[in-house]
Image: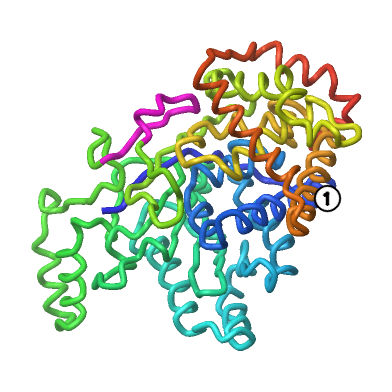
């Protein structure tokens, strides 16, 4: 049985300005490239199918840390950043939002014609996951976004999102072919998700639940019955005979973990040590609050303190290769430490996505305006480390990895605590100096 979970995503409208969209494209592509170089492109699919990592990934790129728009902006950034380098990285992003989602089959067919991938199979998978989340999972959300990411081996991940206009909320669904059992009779309708992100509005009809197998069989057999007989039987059903299946277990059974905000006890978040090959089999839960500002309770303050200690107290001794970069200071190291965690961190590191907004802020000004000078420096250093590592010069790339390792050591052996309010004030007081912008 796969893990199940949910998270609140307040529905926000608007567009991402070009100054941020281009930087998200560049930073997102560099992070994905680093993952490919270190772990392979299957790892990318595994991570995209984890809703907590996905939320942290968007936050580290300066997008609003909690809103529904993070899905659209992240996938648009990846489509722009990865598709021109598809042959190099072995990854292609198809589909998108609105009318672009309906172009997915044509894009997959074109891809199959030019690559030898099994087009019919990929198109069938794309259509099935959309049908399951829109029809078999009747939770009050209408799909309006469908992103299909495929690698050179034909492995794929899906990130799609539905909207409930009346409630002003969104729900994001994650799929990954790496979790589907080829020997399973009904892999697409038998608890297939790796994660669901959204707000639980009570009892829903979930025909993909493992307990709904008999119901699915009954529905199938009903399609072979005479319509008049079905209508006669339906009239005999009374309200007390009607039962609905639960998607979310309020009692927390079946391994479901409730993460109401950000900071949580890591012992309660039971995930495998790596993403690829050990994707969890229950939904992950992540409840994103409605408030725009980032509060102390939205982050793991100890982890944030370790990032600050790494950037400001330890840089000269441990990161000489980075410190020799002209113009690089502790503020950029702070951003790179969080970027390093997104690249090298294990699944249990992403239970507080709001913490990753302390890399490059948020376009809505929370926790602080996007510091463009710092953002550009982070992109430049990460790009330089990747290019040099391809030539065999791995010093800078290894130094970026050590940022995360150093943070972990400080967190393990010390008790760092960030002065949350002072940190916010410090960032805002330097916003003009760092060319901070909001939208």
Q: Position of residue 114 (x, y in %)?
A: 64, 86
Front residue of 44 and 130: 44
The structure's colour scheme is rainbow
Residue 238: which quarter of the image?
bottom left
Q: Which residue is mark 1?
A: 18
Residue 402 position in % (x across, y down): 64, 35
Rendered position, 245 above or below 98: above
Q: Residue at x 27, y 40 (%)?
A: 255
Judge left or right: residue 239 versus residue 92. Answer: left
**Image location (x, y in percent) of residue 430:** 85, 20
Type of secondary structure dominating the magenta stretch: loop
Residue 194 in the image, given as x and y percentages of width and height: 40, 53
Quarter of image, res 377: top right
- 97 lies left or right of 18: left
At a point 54% along the width and 40% down the height, the residue shown is 345
Q: Residue at x 44, y 81 (%)?
A: 121
Does residue 430 show up magenta in the picture?
Answer: no
Tag 1 secondary structure: helix
In the rendered image of this protein, does residue 263 appear above or below residue 148? Answer: above
> Can you say which quadrant of the picture contains the C terminus?
top right
Q: In the displayed structure, would residue 436 be above or below residue 240? A: above
Q: Residues within 10 Å of mark 1 (few under 14, many from 20)?
A: few
Q: Is residue 256 magenta?
A: yes
* Number of marks in picture: 1
Describe residue 216's horizontal placement relative to residue 119 as left or right: left
* Of 41 and 211, the residue lying toward us: 41
Tell me which segment is drawn in magenta. 255-269
């Amino acid at each position: 049985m796969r893990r199940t979970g949910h998270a609140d995503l307040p529905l926000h409208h608007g567009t991402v300005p070009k100054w941020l969209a281009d930087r998200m494209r560049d930073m997102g592509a560099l992070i994905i490239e680093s993952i490919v170089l270190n772990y392979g492109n299957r790892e990318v699919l595994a991570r995209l199918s984890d809703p907590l990592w996905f939320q942290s990934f968007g936050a580290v790129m300066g997008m609003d840390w909690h809103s529904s728009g993070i899905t659209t902006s992240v996938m648009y950034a990846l489509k722009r950043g990865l598709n021109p380098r598809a042959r190099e990285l072995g990854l292609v992003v198809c589909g998108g939002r609105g009318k672009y989602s309906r172009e997915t089959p044509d894009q997959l067919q074109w891809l199959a014609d030019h690559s030898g991938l099994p087009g019919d199979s990929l198109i069938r998978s794309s259509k099935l996951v959309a049908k399951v989340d829109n029809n078999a999972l009747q939770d009050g959300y209408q799909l309006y976004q469908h992103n299909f990411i495929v690698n050179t081996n034909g492995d794929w991940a899906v990130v799609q999102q539905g909207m409930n206009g009346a409630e002003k909320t969104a729900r994001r669904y994650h799929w990954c072919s790496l979790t589907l059992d080829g020997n399973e009779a009904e892999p697409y309708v038998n608890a297939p998700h790796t994660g669901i992100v959204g707000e639980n509005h009570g009892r829903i009809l979930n025909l993909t639940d493992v307990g709904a197998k008999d119901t699915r069989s009954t529905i199938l057999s009903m399609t072979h019955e005479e319509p008049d007989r079905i209508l006669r039987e339906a009239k005999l059903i009374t309200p007390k005979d009607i039962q609905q299946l639960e998607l979310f277990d309020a009692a927390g059974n079946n391994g479901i973990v409730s993460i109401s905000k950000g900071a949580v006890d890591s012992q309660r978040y039971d995930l495998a040590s790596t993403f690829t090959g050990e994707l969890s089999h229950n939904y992950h839960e992540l409840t994103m609050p409605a408030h725009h500002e980032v509060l102390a309770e939205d982050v793991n303050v100890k982890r944030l303190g370790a990032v600050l200690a790494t950037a400001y107290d330890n840089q000269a001794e441990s990161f000489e290769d980075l410190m020799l970069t002209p113009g690089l200071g502790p503020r950029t190291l702070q951003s790179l430490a969080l970027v390093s965690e997104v690249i090298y961190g294990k699944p249990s590191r992403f239970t507080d996505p709001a913490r990753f907004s302390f890399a490059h802020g948020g376009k809505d000004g929370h926790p602080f305006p996007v510091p463009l000078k710092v953002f550009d420096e982070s992109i430049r250093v990460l790009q330089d480390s990747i290019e040099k590592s391809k030539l065999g010069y791995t010093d800078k790339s290894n130094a970026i990895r050590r940022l995360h390792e150093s943070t972990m050591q400080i967190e393990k052996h010390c008790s760092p605590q960030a002065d949350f309010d002072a940190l916010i004030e410090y960032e805002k007081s330097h916003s003009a100096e760092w060319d901070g912008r909001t939208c």
